[in-house]
Image (tube, helix red, strand yellow):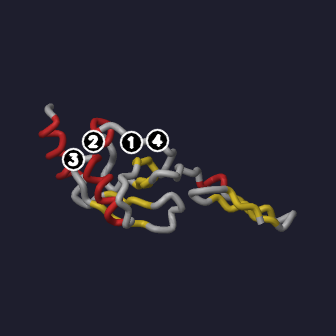
Amino acid sequence: MNLSNSIQRYRINHALGDLIKDVTRAIKKAVVAGTLDEVRSKAAEKFGRTDLPNIHLDSDGTEVDDEDYFQTLEPNAELIAVFSGEQWIDVSYQSWNRSEGSAIVVTGYSVIRS
């Protein structure tokens, strides 16, 4: 199967689009795109950025940096847009230590202890 057929198949299978989030997961946007480059440019537009983000799977942080791999993603895949100066953060590291009364908050830029 050539790339053109793969893109057409992807467009049909992904008609509902993908959910793309910022690194904090506080902002979520829906995008419909047939290629990885389209996802990157639409993410930049939706998040009001001029630079193109790297795209990661929300589930495990895998960077989606290859068109062939992108074409294998399930419809409605949950993606993270990671812009320059940011990094994908595993949300399972966010925790609350009740016994000590302190919180550890993980943001896209740093770890803040309170």
Label 2 near label 3: C-beta < 8 Å? yes
Percent position (x, y) of residue 63? Answer: 43, 42
Picture residue at 51% right of the left edge, 58% below the top: 23
Identified by mark 4, the residue type is: Thr
Whole-Å distance between the Cαs marked 3 and 1? 15 Å
Q: Residues within 10 Å of mark 2 (few under 14, many from 20)?
A: many
Q: Nearer the viewer, residue 87 or 32?
A: 87
Q: Residues within 10 Å of mark 4 (few under 14, many from 20)?
A: few
Name the residue beneath numbered marker 3. 10
Whole-Å distance between the Cαs marked 2 and 4? 14 Å
Name the residue beneath numbered marker 1. 64
Q: Earlier in the sequence, mark 3 or mark 1?
A: 3
Whole-Å distance between the Cαs marked 1 and 2? 10 Å
Q: Residues within 10 Å of mark 3 (few under 14, many from 20)?
A: many
Q: Give the farthest residue toward the front.
A: 50
Identified by mark 3, the residue type is: Tyr
